[in-house]
Image: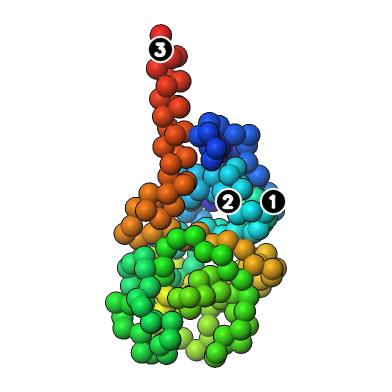
Amino acid sequence: MALALAGTNVASAKNGKEAKEAPAAETANAADELPQGQEVSETVIALAGWVVASKDNQGYPFAIMDKAAAQVLVFGGDGKLRGAAPALFGSAIGDHSAPGVAKLALSAIPGHDRTTPAGRFIGGYGPSEDAGRVLWVDYDSAVSMHPLPPGTPKEKRSERLASATPDDNRVTHGCINVSPAFYEQIVQSTFEKGGVFYVLPDKDSIEETFPEFAQSRAAAKGDDEKDARHARK
């Protein structure tokens, strides 16, 4: 698979030291729709490991969404990777939703406000005004994850999702689009009872977006540097 997760050791959120190999490192039988040769960033790998080690997901399934790489990784409540796929995100670069944007019709949302907000969100299925039952990632901002919508030939969403590069995957009004197959086979069953969603930032720092994770990673780095100094004595 293109997922460079196997064999990864994760940092304990409690003390920053290496924990046992996390279940998040297990990729066997996971669905992989990522373009051939496309890797997963070290930040995503480290965040997945931290979520499992610290139990930040509280036993719920979780997803990590990397806007820059246009990737979605889905994990079960046990921390095992269930699948990874390319995704489409908000056309505007930014990490916050404009006030009142959730109340606007899609066509009325200004281009610069079509962002996918970054952060940690607790979401789940619920009703919507115009699309029936949807998987809300951030209900307050009206951001959901759903299969590629039909009837979007002008935006070429299918072509963008199928391309090997993430450079053309910013096209939505803020929601996250994945392939119908990935949604039906992986997303829908995994998040039937809700879950936790981690969306990496475009502009904000990791420290601003996930402060506890950043502190744990910094502590682990400090411990590694101490061990290296001791080894040189």
Labels 3 and 1: the sequence-earlier one: 1
Question: In percent of the image, x 39 and y 51: which residue is there?
Answer: 206
Q: Is residue 176 visible?
A: yes
Tell me residue 204's x, y (percent): 33, 57
* Measured Cα–Cα span from mark 2 to mark 3: 36 Å
Query: Mark 3: which amino acid?
Result: Arg
Could you say whether the residue bearing mark 3 is in a helix, strand or loop?
loop
Q: How is the image coloured?
A: rainbow
Tell me the quarter of the picture where residue 123 sits: bottom right
Image height check: is 202 above or below 88? above
Q: Which residue is mark 2?
A: 56
- In the image, is 24 to the left or to the right of 219? right
Q: Are marks 2 and 3 in contact (CB under 8 Å)?
A: no
Query: Mark 1: which amino acid?
Result: Asp
Could you say whether the residue bearing mark 1 is in a helix, strand or loop?
loop
Q: Residues within 10 Å of mark 2 (few under 14, many from 20)?
A: some
Image height check: is 231 above or below 190? above
Tell me residue 211's x, y (percent): 42, 49
Q: Which residue is mark 3?
A: 232
Q: Which residue is mark 1?
A: 78
Tell me residue 115's x, y (percent): 37, 72
Tell me the quarter of the picture where residue 182 sits: bottom right
* Measured Cα–Cα span from mark 3 to mark 1: 39 Å
